[in-house]
Amino acid sequence: MSELVHYEVRDRVAVLTIDNPPVNALGPGVWEAIDEAVARASADGAADAIVLVGAGSTFIAGADINVFKLLKTPQDSMDRSAGTHALLVRWEDAPKPLVAAIHGNALGGGLEVAMSCHYRVAAKDAKVGQPEVNLGIIPGAAGTQRLPRLAGAATAIAMCTDGKPVAAAKAKAAGIVDEVVDGDLLTGAIAFAKARAAAGERRQTREIGFDADAKAAGLAACEKARASLRPEPRAPHAAIDAIQAALTLPFDQGSVRERELFAERVVSTESKALRHLFFAEREAARVADVKKDTPTVEIKRAAVVGAGTMGGGIAMSYANAGIPVLLKEVDDAALQRGLATIRKNYEGSVAKGRLTPEAYERTMALITPTTSYDGFDAVDIVVEAVFENMDLKQRTFADLGRVTRPDCVLASNTSTLDIDVFAQASGRPAQVVGHHFFSPANVMKLLEIVRGKETSASVVASSVKLGKKLAKVPVVVGNCFGFVANRMLAYYMREAYLLLEEGAPVEQVDRVLMDFGLPVGPFGMQDIAGIDVGARIRQYLASVGQTRAEGPQSEVPDRLFEMGRYGQKTGAGWYRYEPGSRERIPDPLVEQLAAEAAAKRGIARRKVGDDEILARIATALANEGARVLEDGFAQRASDIDVIYCYGFGFPRHRGGPMFYADTVGLPTVLARVREYRARFGDYWKPAPLLERMVAEGRRLYQD
Ligand code: 3HC
Ligand code: NAI
């Protein structure tokens, strides 16, 4: 018998245990091994029923995602999936009750395998889902055909288009799971299987039909769901098409339609982009010279200094992860302000039903307010989030060096300052690291871990581990101005400002970027974040003779700042806002400021095409990204993609700015940089790495 599926008979039930660590993905050989085991159990006179269970921490996390890159054409996919579909039908035809015992996750192909069993029994904390859309594909092993039969079209549409897993209790209510087991799962599943065998029951999902009402409701749900989707990404549309086929065609024909739709999606750029990000996110946590066995500090207690916008959100992130946190402020008034904001945030979650009142109390109790350093000698980490001021940060780090234990991690949430300077002030530079959270820190998932000159490997490794515990996506970056995210953003914004001066209204620039897939364009985003934030950074840089991004500095954002137009919080910024509304209303004043700025710089304003807007902004990002990479501030191109997708909402289905550059073609990107240099000036310098890669005919990513 295969190593991938273990076989034993317990109490006249054949127990088939899939054992393919770490997540029992349906990789090469696993399908075949299950098939062999089901056949053996079917013929085994010592077994009256069969239970399929996963070894380790989970049932099956889905098909092996690595395999999809082997499918070069839709036909490759069609050929392969025919066999898979046939296997599932064969298992469904097993002569004895076949029960899936689900713990951990049954995702994608995992749920599809479970649905081809006659029954599903789940542990209380198990989850089931069809997350394929997150990879730019649709369920490809008849999930779109079996799920609507079990749970109805509306539930199937929701699960296959948003990709979110469903908890066991909800899955039972929906008809996906037959029983939720409170105690030992395998014991419960064996008992369940024996009872079905005794009653002579076997239920084949594929035999479940739709009556006329269910069919009509299902078709209406398909239409409604289609109307709510953006044109791209395409995978959710394809999932609905496949579910519609389940409603209108016999099972076999519906399955063929699903295979065709899957085949089209799996070779798409959208799917390649999303699969790239799946692995990129996990790769980002690895640091070349920090070995896997590097000792890490377990963070059991934390402290945050500063309870402002960021400090409050950071304290919430710790509390949400169950880590007790001291929250320090300068005085009681500031502390109460910070706590009031935290409470308001949690109360909002309670009101929306996302948090129970008990969980709110429990979580809030983990945050201990203070105005002194008492208790700092007991914490494993301190995150500094005081004002962005070098003197203040240096003083704070000197204090932290005195009041904490030598092994305490000292993290700073600075967005622009040189962490090596306050690392020295602490007297313990090896313990100092940047933990750059994004606003709102309790919501945004990106965490840039900034490695200083002397940051120890153990502090880096501990930070990565902690980042995951805080439910963040940690990416290790180098210590340059703006680190990776804000350094790239400076070029993104520079181009947006210059396009505005040249004649593209803010609403056109924003619309183009939103059509591309961003949730909000550059100007709308700045109205949310605050025009004052960038203006103050520019003021500071000007005082030390620097600029954020090479090239002409538009005066328009600074003029808005001078007028007190900071964005949504002041009712006006790049747009106007009616009281209490976030609707962006174009303001002729901004056009006037842009025209004045253009006149001063001798620019003849013109009509700028949508294509040029996208090309200029995407090229600025890719060119600067190549420099960040070559300078070693990002370890790999894919880290930049992860950062920009999680930090600024770059559309995931485009794979991130570097992946997108590869899609456009590096020779085209370079040709654009050269063209812009000729048109606009020498500040458009091709990144040497980009030039070299084009000269050598290389791409950033291989297919
Ligand atoms: N295929 C290949 N590798 C996978 C995988 C999969 N389906 N799922 C997880 N892995 C790998 C990860 O890359 C990671 O590898 P690494 O240690 O080398 O980085 C390792 O397994 C552990 O994964 P995580 O770090 O993500 O572990 P977590 O415990 O945080 O999360 C999980 C577990 C929730 C199962 C998460 O891994 C996950 O969401 N996996 C993907 C689930 C998915 O998308 N399934 C659908 C696949 S497509 C499909 O099934 C098509 C079908 O319809 C035919
Ligand atoms: P903020 O002004 O909202 O809060 C700073 C808080 O620090 C204030 O409440 C202040 O009273 C407190 N403080 C000052 N000195 C202190 C001391 N000695 N001890 C305890 N508390 C003290 O500022 P914000 O926006 O929270 O920024 C904090 C840090 O986070 C800055 O370094 C900033 O650059 C960085 N950051 C800000 C982001 C944002 O979007 N606001 C995003 C990412 C990083």
Image (cartoon, grey):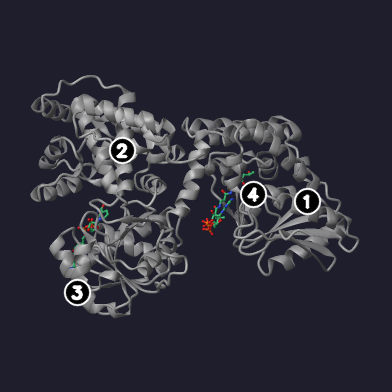
Q: Residues within 10 Å of mark 2 (few under 14, many from 20)?
A: many
Question: Could you tell me how far apart the alpha carbons at marks 2 and 4 are, in whole angstroms?
Answer: 49 Å
Q: Which residue is mark 4?
A: 174
Residue 553 appears at what percent x and percent y? 15, 37
Q: Which residue is mark 1?
A: 35
* Disc number for residue 82: none
Q: Earlier in the sequence, mark 2 or mark 1?
A: 1
Given the image, on which type of amino acid does mark 2 rest?
A: Asn
Judged from the image, the secondary structure of the residue bearing numbered disc 3 is: helix
Residue lying at the far front in this picture: please name it.
Answer: 696
Which residue occupies 37% across, 39% down? 519
- Labels 3, 1: front one: 1
Judged from the image, the secondary structure of the residue bearing numbered disc 2 is: helix
501 shown above or below 698: above
Q: Is mark 3 within 8 Å of ligand 2?
A: yes
Question: Could you tell me how far apart the alpha carbons at marks 3 and 2 are, in whole angstroms?
Answer: 41 Å
Q: Which residue is mark 3?
A: 399
